[in-house]
Amino acid sequence: MNSDTVNPPRKKKQWKSTASRRREILDAALECFLKHGVQGATIEQIRRRSKASHGSIYHLFSGKDEIALTLFVEGMQVYHQKIVAALEQETTARGCLRAIIATHLQDVVDDPRLSIYLTRLGMADDLGPISERFKTLSDEFAQTVWSHLEPFVARGELVRLPSELYFAQIVGPAAHLARSWLRGRVTFDLLSATDPLVEAAWKSLRAR
């Protein structure tokens, strides 16, 4: 039998196994980081929770810091992609504001544990490469959001602000509420706050 007809399925199966193991390690690391903090968690704790061997972990990651960075960067990238995808469906200024706020709240509800991790690291004073990567991601994302809002600003539908301020102005109250919800200080349905938050954002940003 020609070896070419045998190798592709084997490689595909191996790829799936590697991807699955990588996901298991990241999921285990998330639990360890939430419980012990990034600084307090150890590779051994991650290894035990993921049931991976040390060889498997170090084959995929250089160490705990790379795992923490990967978890953060990939989490933020997925979050940003969801916001941008929602924005691309909108054709009105108010619709864009709703897309951002509704997507943010839904993302928190869908994956609260990852949201806690991203929030903690995003607000940390200095985590070296994580802090640097967060700034880069945030700057790029702010410009992408601005590119969707700029036409409405140019037409006089939204007030003109420095481009970096729009996302904070729109999602700031929702993010604050979501943090309270994640800590258990707010117990009502988080998604029920969507309409009031959209109305507040619209009133603060629409051109008079």
Image (cartoon, rainbow, N blue to C red):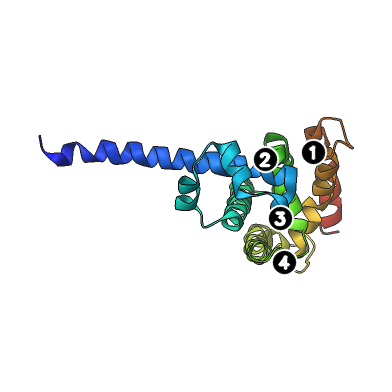
Total labels: the figure holds: 4
Marks 3, 2: nearer the viewer: 3
Q: Give the Cα separation between the discs numbered 1 and 3.
A: 35 Å
Kindly identify which residue carries mark 3. Answer: 39
Q: Give the Cα separation between the discs numbered 4 and 3.
A: 34 Å
How packed mark 3 is, by other alpha carbons closer than 10 Å (few <14, some 14-19, many 20 or more), is few
| Residue 186 in the image, given as x and y percentages of width and height | 88, 36
Residue 31's label in the rendered image is 2
Q: Which of marks 1 and 3 is nearer the N terminus?
A: 3
Q: Which of marks 4 and 1 is nearer the N terminus?
A: 4
In-image side of 161 versus 148 (left or right): right
Kindly identify which residue carries mark 4. Answer: 163
Q: Is mark 3 on a helix, strand or loop?
A: helix
Q: Which of the two residues, 37 or 166, is positioned nearer the viewer here?
A: 37
Q: Tell me the kind of residue under disc 4.
A: Ser
| Residue 188 in the image, given as x and y percentages of width and height | 86, 30
The vertical placement of 167 against 52, above or below, is below
